[in-house]
């Protein structure tokens, strides 16, 4: 899942960026309204966390531009002003939720999960391929009933592969869905992460499910196909 944070308080923006990345979201940050509007319109995001009090363009202006441009991403407004008129104005402009500063990061996470579930209401609670089961709600992975220990990034990579079972997932797609704008396209971090996922998911089990498609990317195949 890709999230855009538009927040001019750099300390808070850095905290949100780090905390959301630790939850395996791909996160980009903009520090003013103009940059935020540009990134939101030119990119594809599942959720936008948008501060109201921003330089260059305030959050209300940004939100109005996004909706007028046809951007349907969920928007969570942040503000230090807890007035009914501000909440009503934001919701009327098309915001999906509203959070007053200061807030606990745990509450923000809960609201993020709730908003993303609205767009994924038809998504399954778990993803599976044969005896491999990834529980999206509990954030657990098992194979043949055995619990596997994955890092947040490994979990996100495996979820991406499972969402596209029997398809080829390119390196570019993994970078877009699991990493963020700071991803170095010349690094081998994707190869290393997939290697660790494969070691945990396939070592000691049969048949192996994760396969490298040379020069293209990776594919997680259903057991009946993987065994062929």
Image (cartoon, helix red, strand yellow):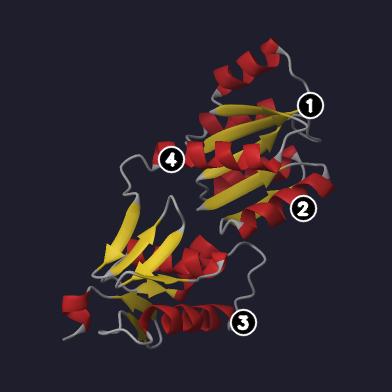
Badge number at residue 80: 1
Residue 65 spot, x, y in % from top left:
59, 31
Mark 1: give few (<14), some (14-19) or many (20+) Cα within 10 Å. Answer: few
Mark 4: give few (<14), some (14-19) or many (20+) Cα within 10 Å. Answer: few
Give the labeled residue for mark 2. 14
Taking the spot 34% from the left edge, 55% from the top edge, the residue there is 126
Badge number at residue 117: 4
Q: Are marks 3 and 1 in contact (CB under 8 Å)?
A: no
Mark 2: give few (<14), some (14-19) or many (20+) Cα within 10 Å. Answer: some
Query: What separation in Å lies between label 4 and label 3 (alpha carbons)?
Result: 34 Å
Q: Earlier in the sequence, mark 4 or mark 3?
A: 4
Q: Earlier in the sequence, mark 3 or mark 1?
A: 1
Under tag 3, what secondary structure? Answer: loop
- Camera-side residue of 48 and 196: 196
Query: What separation in Å lies between label 2 and label 4 (alpha carbons)?
Result: 25 Å
**The C terminus is located in which quarter?**
bottom left
Q: Nearer the viewer, mark 3 or mark 1?
A: 1
Q: Earlier in the sequence, mark 2 or mark 3?
A: 2
Q: Earlier in the sequence, mark 2 or mark 4?
A: 2
Residue 212 spot, x, y in % from top left:
37, 85
Query: What separation in Å lies between label 2 and label 3 (alpha carbons)?
Result: 24 Å
Does residue 206 appear to the left or right of 16 in the view shown?
left
Badge number at residue 126: none
Taking the spot 57% from the left edge, 36% from the top edge, the residue there is 111
Q: Earlier in the sequence, mark 1 or mark 4?
A: 1
Badge number at residue 186: 3
Q: Are marks 2 and 4 in contact (CB under 8 Å)?
A: no
Q: Earlier in the sequence, mark 1 or mark 2?
A: 2
Viewer can see residue 24? yes
Q: Are marks 4 and 3 in contact (CB under 8 Å)?
A: no
């Amino acid at each position: 899942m890709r999230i855009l944070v538009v927040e001019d308080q750099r300390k808070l923006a850095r905290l949100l960026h780090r905390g959301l990345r630790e939850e395996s979201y791909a996160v980009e940050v903009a520090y003013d309204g103009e940059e935020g509007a540009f990134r939101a319109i030119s990119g594809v995001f599942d959720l936008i966390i948008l501060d109201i009090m921003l330089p260059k363009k305030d959050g209300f202006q940004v939100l109005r531009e996004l909706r007028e441009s046809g951007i349907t991403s969920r928007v969570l407004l942040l503000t230090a002003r807890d007035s009914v008129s501000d909440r009503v104005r934001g919701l009327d402009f098309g915001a999906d939720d509203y959070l007053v500063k200061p807030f606990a990061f745990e509450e923000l996470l809960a609201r993020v999960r709730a908003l993303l579930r609205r767009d994924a209401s038809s998504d399954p609670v778990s993803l599976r391929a044969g005896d491999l089961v990834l529980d999206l709600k509990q954030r657990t992975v098992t194979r043949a009933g055995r619990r596997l220990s994955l890092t947040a990034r490994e979990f996100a990579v495996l979820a991406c592969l499972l969402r596209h079972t029997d398809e080829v997932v390119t390196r570019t797609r993994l970078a877009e869905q699991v990493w963020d704008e700071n991803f170095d396209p010349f690094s081998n971090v994707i190869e290393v992460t997939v290697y660790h996922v494969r070691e945990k998911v396939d070592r000691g089990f049969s048949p192996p499910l994760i396969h490298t498609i040379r020069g293209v990317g990776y594919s997680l195949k259903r057991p009946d196909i993987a065994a062929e």
